[in-house]
Image (spheres, grey):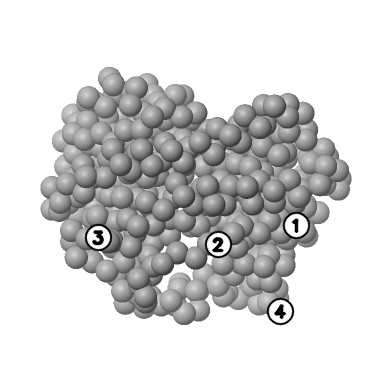
Amino acid sequence: MNGMVAQVKSLPALLTTVFTELDETARKSLHPELILSLKRIFITGCGDSHHASLNSELAFKTLTGLPVEVATAMQFARYSAGFIPQTGPFTNLVIGISVSGEVTRTLEALNMARQAGATTLALSATPGSRVAMAGDVLFQVPNPAFPDPEGVHIPGARSFFINQVALLLIAIRIGEVRGTLTSPQATAIRNEIFALGKVIEETINSNESAIQKLAADWKDAKEFVFAGSGPNFGIALFTAAKVLEASGDPALGQDTEEWCHLQYFAKDANTPTFAITAAERDLSRVTEMVVAAKAIGRRVVVIAPKTALELTKLADAAFTFSPVREMFSHLVTQIPGLLFAAYRAEVVGEPFFRGFGGGRSTEGGGGISRIRTSELSEKWMP
């Protein structure tokens, strides 16, 4: 089996496996004194970790009742951390996400946050890593082994999924302690997230064959565009990244509104375009976007709830799922894009990550891109 497809299919069982541990860690990691003192939350990371941050923003705002800011680690460390309001101990929480714990820009972000007087939480699968050690609090996420083909690096789906669930459970815990949520409400929301495993499994089963066929039918495509808003803006960025990692094809993740301002000018009129939505706050605008995309000749896919009938009938293809609340929808809407990326690589015969050729490397954190080393990080290296 395609190793990336296998990872996607493992997600429902993965949710069952890690949920209780993540929930217990969320309860233990942040003590009530900190939670009750909080005035604002910042969430940061690079790549998939940044996408997970974006996905969680709506849930954090809804469940905690606190102001929440999300930024890439570079933006936060070098352009924002120095402007954090000085409002006393435990009032600013900065969550930095890095599975490996060795992403330099996230290390910079946490160190700059500490210098600014913020409390830092490192969300990582690697205790003892530089990022983990830079956190005042370590939220250690599990990293269950998965039997990838020997010697084959697979574009990540599992660690990204775990991080998303962890962030949601942190938000629930903060809301519960602060009284934004009653204990029964918090318990009900945890159960709601746990139950999404069945929705994910159903989404895979009902869409996989159509996605595989579409990847074959659109073999001629040269580039791809993914658009979304709110928690699904992060999914647009993430699924575009997975296409790039899986097959090497140019892929763009874009905010739905920004798509409407710019994509008319693209030379290739029939570029496959994916509109991703939970069909809530953004439904009217996504509908307008799809109408516009078809009018200019785009091949359009809609990823949306089954109930969004008026929207899905406008598209060339629709990959649907049972309705879920918008702030949790990203756990489900990522599935079709991941499967498409996996089957696209298979159809065009490209090895994942293009075999790490052309200056790429599995060593040193990406070879010439230096994502784990830089001149600014040297003073923080042990």
The residue positioned 77% from the left and 28% from the top of the image is: 179
The residue mark sitting in front, 2 or 1, is 2
The residue positioned 62% from the left and 61% from the top of the image is: 124
The residue mark sitting in front, 4 or 1, is 1
Residue type at numbered disc 2 = Asn
Q: Position of residue 180 (x, y in %)?
A: 72, 28
**C-alpha span from label 2 to label 1:** 19 Å
Q: Using the image, tell me which numbered label, if any, was put on residue 345.
A: 3
Secondary element at tag 2: loop
Q: Tag 1 or tag 2, which sits nearer the N-term?
A: 1
Total numbered labels: 4
Secondary element at tag 1: strand
- Label 2–label 3 contact, CB within 8 A: no
Residue pointed to by mark 1: 137
Residue type at numbered disc 1 = Val
Residue 45 image-quadrant placement = bottom right
Residue pointed to by mark 2: 143
The residue mark sitting in front, 4 or 2, is 2
Can residue 88 be seen here? The reply is yes
Q: Tag 3 or tag 4, which sits nearer the N-term?
A: 3
Density class for disc 4 (Cα within 10 Å; few <14, some 14-19, many ≥20) is: few
Residue type at numbered disc 3 = Ala
Residue pointed to by mark 4: 382
**C-alpha span from label 4 to label 2:** 25 Å
